[in-house]
Image (cartoon, rainbow, N blue to C red):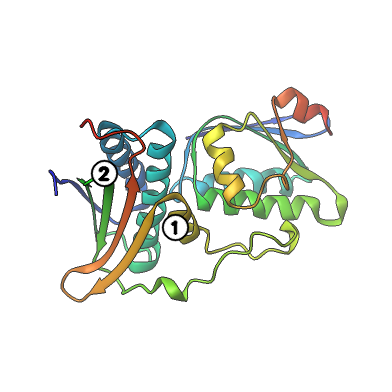
Amino acid sequence: MGVEYEICVTSQLSNLSEIADFVSDRAALTGLDERQVFEVQMATDEACTNSMEHAYEGREDGEVRVCCYLEGNDFVVRITDFGRPFDPNNVPKPDLVSPLEERQIGGLGIFFMRELMDSVEFSSDPVAGNQVIMRKRRRKAATA
Amino acid sequence: MEIKTEHLKRCDLITLSGRFDSSTAPELEKALRTSMDEGMYRLVIDMGQVEYFGSAAIRALVIAYKECRRWNRGDVRLANTPSNVRHVFELAGLVPVIEMYESSTLAVGSF
C-alpha cells in the first residue's frame, strides 16, 4: 500500500464540497482520467451523504473520515463513520424501468456507488466504525 | 451553487450553476416548487453550468417532473446537459425519459 491521504470532517452536509475537492484532486493526481475522477467523486459524495444522513441521522457533530490511497493499480477510497451501523442489504434496489410517473424515488445513492466503482465493500465494527471501501481501477499504466 | 428563474411567456427557464449535492439540492427543490406553486408546470432547466448533480438533486428533479406532468398540464425539459451529468441520468434510467435539448432556446421553443 502506498501513501494514504486523509481528510476528516464533521457530519455537516455543507462539508460535502470539501470532500469532493479532496477526492477529485487525489484521483486526478494518481492518473485517473477525467470521467473516472468524476465517477470516484460522485460515489464518494453518495457514500458520505449516507454517513451524514443515515449513520448520524442528521446529527452534525459526527466524524467522517475519507482516506485515499493507491493499491496496485486500484485507486481506493475508504470512508469511515462512527454512527449507527449500516446494512446496505436493507436498502431496496431502485426501480429504473417503470414509467417515471410510477417510480418510487429512493435507493439511488448506493446504486450509483456500485455502478460507478469497480468494487464497493461495507463493514461495521463497534470499534473501527462503519467503513465503505471503494475501488477504481486505473485505465492508464501506473505513472504516479 | 446558483439558481436563476426567468418567467417567459410559455414556460419558466431555470438556469443552474455549480454543485448540486445533498447540501444544496433542497434549494433546487425550493426553486422548482416555487414555479409550480405559481401555477407554472412547463419548466426548462438549463444545466450548462452544472458541475455536479447527485442523487438528492435527481430526486428533486424527478419529483418536479412527476408533478408537472400530472393531468398533462406540463413537463420538465432539460437543456445543455453536460456529458458527466448525462452519464449519471443514463445510469438512473432517465434517458430517454426526460426530454433533453442542445440549447435552452430549443427547449423553450419546444413548448
Say whether residue A130 is left or right of residue A118. Answer: left
| Residue B16 x/y as whole percent | 57, 33
Q: Which residue is mark 1?
A: A114
Few, some or many C-alpha atoms within 10 Å of disc 2 (few <14, some 14-19, many ≥20)? some
Distance of mark 2 from mark 1, alpha carbons?
Answer: 19 Å
Disc 1, SS: helix
| Residue A143 x/y as whole percent | 22, 30
Quarter of the picture holding the C terminus of chain B? top right
Under mark 2, the amino acid is Asn
Question: What residue do we see at 63% from left, 48% from top?
Answer: B61
Decide if residue B49 is in sight here: yes
Q: Which residue is mark 2?
A: A73
Q: How many marks?
A: 2
Decide if residue A56 is in sight here: no
For the residue pair A42 and A70, the one nearer the viewer reads as A70
Task: Please tell me whether residue B81 is drawn above or below residue B76 in the rendered image.
Answer: above
